[in-house]
Image (cartoon, helix red, strand yellow):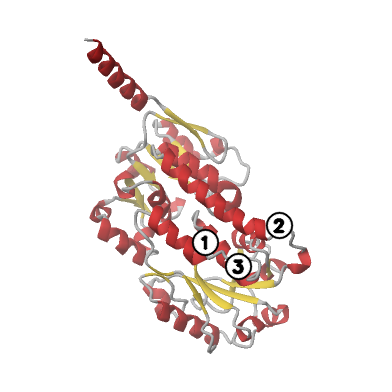
Amino acid sequence: MKGFFLFFCGLLFAWQAQAAPITVTDITGREVTLAQPAKRIILTQARHMPVLALLHPDPVSLIAGWSDEFKTAFVNEYEQYQKQFPAIRDIPTVGRHTAESFSVEQSLALRPDLVVLTARFAGLLPNQDPNESALIRRFEAAGVPVLIVDFFMDPLQNTVPSLKALGAAIGATERTQAFIDFYQEQMQAVQHRLQDLDEQERPPVFIHAHAGSTDCCNSPGTGTFNDMVRYAGGHNIGVDVLKTPTGKLNYEFINARNPHVYVATGTGAKRREQAGGLLIGTAIEPEQAQKSLQRVIQSNKLQHLRAVQQHNAHGIWHAFNDSPLHMIFIQALASWIHPQRMQGLSAQQTLDYVNQHFLTVPMQGTYIVDLPASGL
């Protein structure tokens, strides 16, 4: 009888623990309470699907509705997920990747238990009170919790709290903490090697954003990429003249700044290849990526830059910038900017480890590429 009583008490305790509400704090300081781990999420920006894939063994099963951008802007990645999770084809679309196209009515009809969005998507300016967002108020009035995350606007500050909140909300605290520990270890590995760096030791770096898919030359100014270049020990030349997150630099300015490091970014989307852009990412072979990097440099008449002449020209997957995997972007940058300081640290090995230990759908393709030693 005593054994049965203890068994019954154990079951009761387990049920109570499972039924206990979950309260998390998002990046704005809002306390968000869920009755239980979220199982029907509205993902307002589907580009964050791989973030869920870091934290959950079946991320597709969590999505009740999403934007269409993972199917349209990340075609190769979508095909990879479809192979492993065919149910991804059946996820209802509730808008594109913009707030203007998003349908609250369609979302509510899907009976969500959590909405995940960014402050910008919610229409909030930096430091603005979240209660001023009409979008958030509509969901909360319907009894649907809303979680604000950020891996783009201020990723160096907001990535860890975003992961903690999201991981707790889906009941994946342990796996999330394991990834956070790894993330912080990799970021600190760069920081430790650069801790005594002087300002004079920051060489000029040219980030050629979405290289080749537009007229020369899109580049980051203030914000995300600039912060990452600085973290990696370089100086982003775009910030000298661009006071917005992105803009265009002309050849004369780029040449005059004499960048020591050239980094082209791009994706593997087929339309990019047709437009002459950098071909890199999921399902792309190394030789394809190298040839497209050569083509981008030549077509934009950048072959005479010091960085290219000294074989310090590279390509990298653009989508690292809105993901916790920006640690790979930063490690690659740091190794190109300060190769001697970064000995023993490999961005590719970091990506390999993430694939093996965290990502439910591993990233298969070429995400980092160097200009061949033979040059152009």
- Few, some or many residues within 10 Å of mark 2 (<14, 14–19, 20+): few
Mark 2 in CB contact with mark 1 (< 8 angstroms): no
Which numbered disc, 2 or 1, marks the residue closer to the eye?
Answer: 2
Outermost residue to the top: 1
The label shown at residue 343 is: 3
Mark 1 in CB contact with mark 3 (< 8 angstroms): no
Residue 7's spot in the image, x, y percent? Answer: 26, 18
- Residue topped by disc 1: 328
User: Can you tell which quarter of the image residue 82 is in?
Assistant: bottom left
| Residue shown at the point (65%, 65%) measured from the top left | 221
Q: Is residue 246 above or below residue 217?
A: above
Disc 2 or 1, which lies upstream in sequence? 2
| Residue shown at the point (77%, 63%) measured from the top left | 198
Residue 141's spot in the image, x, y percent? Answer: 43, 31
The reply, left or right, for residue 151 in relation to residue 255 is left
The amino acid pointed to by label 3 is: Gln
Disc 3 or 2, which lies upstream in sequence? 2
The amino acid pointed to by label 2 is: Gln
Task: Count the marks.
Answer: 3
The label shown at residue 195 is: 2
Q: Secondary structure at mark 2?
A: loop
User: Can you tell which quarter of the image residue 239 is in?
Assistant: bottom right
